[in-house]
Amino acid sequence: MIGSQRALMALQMFESAQQIVLSSLDPALSEQDRRRERCRRFYGDELACAIFPLEATKQNQSHGETKSDAITPPAS
Protein backbone atom coordinates (compact mmCIF):
# COMPACT_ATOMS: atom_id res chain seq x y z
CA MET A 1 0.00 0.00 0.00
CA ILE A 2 1.46 3.35 -1.02
CA GLY A 3 1.55 6.37 1.25
CA SER A 4 -1.36 8.15 -0.40
CA GLN A 5 -3.55 5.07 0.09
CA ARG A 6 -2.62 4.91 3.78
CA ALA A 7 -3.38 8.62 4.18
CA LEU A 8 -6.77 8.21 2.48
CA MET A 9 -7.59 5.25 4.74
CA ALA A 10 -6.64 7.24 7.85
CA LEU A 11 -8.81 10.16 6.72
CA GLN A 12 -11.78 7.87 6.12
CA MET A 13 -11.35 6.27 9.55
CA PHE A 14 -11.21 9.70 11.23
CA GLU A 15 -14.34 10.84 9.38
CA SER A 16 -16.13 7.66 10.48
CA ALA A 17 -15.11 8.27 14.09
CA GLN A 18 -16.44 11.82 13.90
CA GLN A 19 -19.77 10.55 12.55
CA ILE A 20 -20.03 8.08 15.43
CA VAL A 21 -19.45 10.87 17.97
CA LEU A 22 -21.89 13.23 16.25
CA SER A 23 -24.57 10.54 16.06
CA SER A 24 -24.32 10.03 19.83
CA LEU A 25 -25.04 13.70 20.62
CA ASP A 26 -28.42 15.15 21.50
CA PRO A 27 -30.03 16.32 18.23
CA ALA A 28 -31.36 19.40 20.03
CA LEU A 29 -27.82 20.80 20.49
CA SER A 30 -26.91 23.85 18.46
CA GLU A 31 -24.22 23.55 15.79
CA GLN A 32 -21.78 25.38 18.08
CA ASP A 33 -22.52 22.98 20.94
CA ARG A 34 -22.05 20.00 18.63
CA ARG A 35 -18.67 21.34 17.48
CA ARG A 36 -17.59 21.96 21.07
CA GLU A 37 -18.63 18.51 22.21
CA ARG A 38 -16.91 16.84 19.25
CA CYS A 39 -13.72 18.73 20.12
CA ARG A 40 -14.01 17.77 23.79
CA ARG A 41 -14.51 14.09 23.05
CA PHE A 42 -11.64 13.88 20.57
CA TYR A 43 -9.08 16.14 22.21
CA GLY A 44 -10.15 16.54 25.86
CA ASP A 45 -11.26 19.42 28.04
CA GLU A 46 -8.04 21.40 27.87
CA LEU A 47 -8.24 22.07 24.15
CA ALA A 48 -12.04 22.37 24.15
CA CYS A 49 -11.83 25.00 26.92
CA ALA A 50 -9.15 26.88 25.00
CA ILE A 51 -11.30 27.00 21.87
CA PHE A 52 -14.70 27.36 23.57
CA PRO A 53 -13.75 28.98 26.91
CA LEU A 54 -17.04 29.71 28.66
CA GLU A 55 -19.29 27.21 26.93
CA ALA A 56 -17.06 24.17 27.54
CA THR A 57 -16.76 24.93 31.23
CA LYS A 58 -20.53 25.37 31.62
CA GLN A 59 -21.34 22.14 29.83
CA ASN A 60 -18.89 20.03 31.82
CA GLN A 61 -20.21 21.41 35.08
CA SER A 62 -23.83 20.83 34.05
CA HIS A 63 -23.01 17.19 33.20
CA GLY A 64 -21.10 16.75 36.46
CA GLU A 65 -17.93 15.81 34.59
CA THR A 66 -14.38 16.54 35.55
CA LYS A 67 -11.33 16.90 33.37
CA SER A 68 -10.36 13.30 34.05
CA ASP A 69 -13.81 12.09 32.89
CA ALA A 70 -13.37 13.66 29.48
CA ILE A 71 -9.94 12.26 28.74
CA THR A 72 -10.19 8.82 30.31
CA PRO A 73 -11.12 6.21 27.72
CA PRO A 74 -14.15 4.08 28.59
CA ALA A 75 -13.50 0.66 30.08
CA SER A 76 -13.83 -2.18 27.60
Image: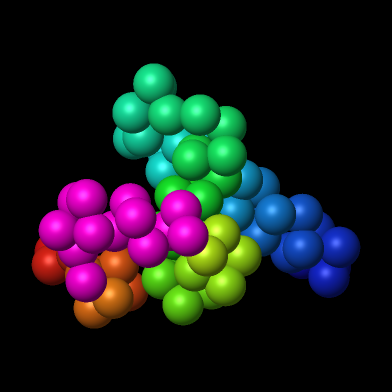
> Quick check: 18 above or below 68?
above
Residue 40 percent location from the top left of the image: 44, 61
Camera-side residue: 3 or 65? 65
> Quick check: 2 above or below 63?
below
Looking at the image, can residue 75 be seen?
yes
Looking at the image, can residue 16 be seen?
no
Give the quarter of the figure containing the N terminus.
bottom right
Left or right? Give the position of 24 relative to 72: right
Quarter where residue 56 is shown: bottom left
**Residue lying at 57% horizontally and 72% vertically, measured from the top left:** 50
Camera-side residue: 52 or 14? 52
**Residue lying at 33% horizontally and 52% vertically, measured from the top left:** 59
> Quick check: 15 above or below 42?
above
Q: Would you say residue 44 sits in the magenta stretch?
A: no
Residue 60 percent location from the top left of the image: 29, 58
Q: How many marks?
A: 0
Residue 47 percent location from the top left of the image: 53, 73
Left or right? Give the position of 49 relative to 69: right
Give the quarter of the figure containing the C terminus.
bottom left
Quarter where residue 58 is shown: bottom left
Left or right? Give the position of 3 relative to 16: right
Camera-side residue: 10 or 44? 44
**Residue lying at 43% horizontally and 29% vertically, measured from the top left:** 29
Residue 18 percent location from the top left of the image: 53, 46
The figure's colour scheme reads rainbow
**Residue lying at 33% horizontally and 28% vertically, measured from the top left:** 26
Magenta span: helix, strand or loop, mainly?
A: helix
The residue positioned farthest toward the top in the image shown: 28
Camera-side residue: 25 or 75? 25
The range drawn in magenta is 54-66
Q: Would you say residue 59 sits in the magenta stretch?
A: yes
